Amino acid sequence: MQEFIINMINQLGYLGIFLLVVIENIFPPIPSEFILIFAGVFTTYTSLSCFSVILYATLGSLVGAYILYFVGFLLNKERLKRFVDSKIGRMLRLKVADVEKADTFFVNRGNKAVFFCRFVPIVRSLISIPAGMSRMPLFRFTIYTTIATVIWNFVLVFLGSVVGSNWNHVVTFFSNYSGLVRVVLIFLVLYFLFLLFKRKKF
């Protein structure tokens, strides 16, 4: 996986980042953390810029989110659960519980679920499906998804640019403590959001 991501970015540049992020959004088991941190590392010794990396990664996230949104638009929850529980769904490491979690969170929290779930691994992709199933207005879906995605992408790309040549250590750390790292990243993003919105009504 590591070599595939590096080769895609190395050979295709921004297009590679765009395609990788689209794939990551459609197939949640592929970690966006690796893709975006590697992309950030590339900005330290290639002509890639952080701004453009974030831009193309955000566009890729939107395309992936739209695909799942329209999947949800065409499906109902029971059909989706049957697919997730099928052989293909299990090959993609999807779980019925994740679908239920995303759907329940969306129903209980309303439109804000689309925003906050973009910071939760696996659910960040699946939340687009109940949004489509509930016929959430596409413009509103786009706004919430874009804002959350830009924040997530910025944090990870910036981290990669800071790490730079020490990326091997980061890969090792991710491999050994991926669960912990995800929790820390989510905490940092949520803390950033708290500072940003503490005096505003979201």
Image: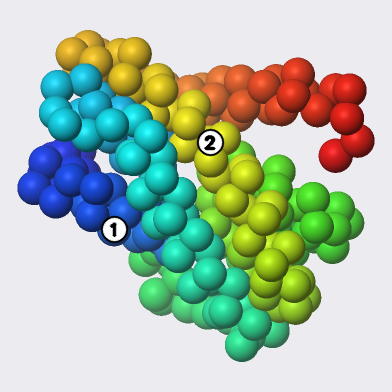
Image quarter in which the C terminus is found? top right
**Residue at screen point 36% across, 49% down:** 56
Q: Which of the two residues, 105 or 140, is positioned nearer the viewer here?
A: 140
* Residue 16 as seen in the image, left or right of residue 73: left
- Whole-number angstrom distance, CA of label 2 to CA of label 1: 17 Å
Which residue carries the number 1 mark? 19
Left or right of residue 72: residue 28: left
> In which quadrant will I find the N terminus?
top left
What count of labels does the image hold? 2
Q: Which residue is drawn at 55% across and 79% down?
A: 71
Answer whether residue 34 is visible to the viewer in this image.
no
Label 1 SS: helix
Residue type at mark 2 is Trp
- Residue highlighted by disc 2: 152
- Residue 188, image x, y percentages: 61, 20
Crowd class of label 2 (few under 14; some 14 to 19; many from 20; radius 10 Å): many
Q: Is residue 133 above or below residue 143?
A: below
Return the x and y of residue 144 as percentages of the image width and height.
Answer: 69, 52
Quadrant in the rendering for residue 195: top right
Residue 75 drawn above or below residue 41: below
Q: In the displayed structure, does residue 163 sit left or right of residue 63? A: left
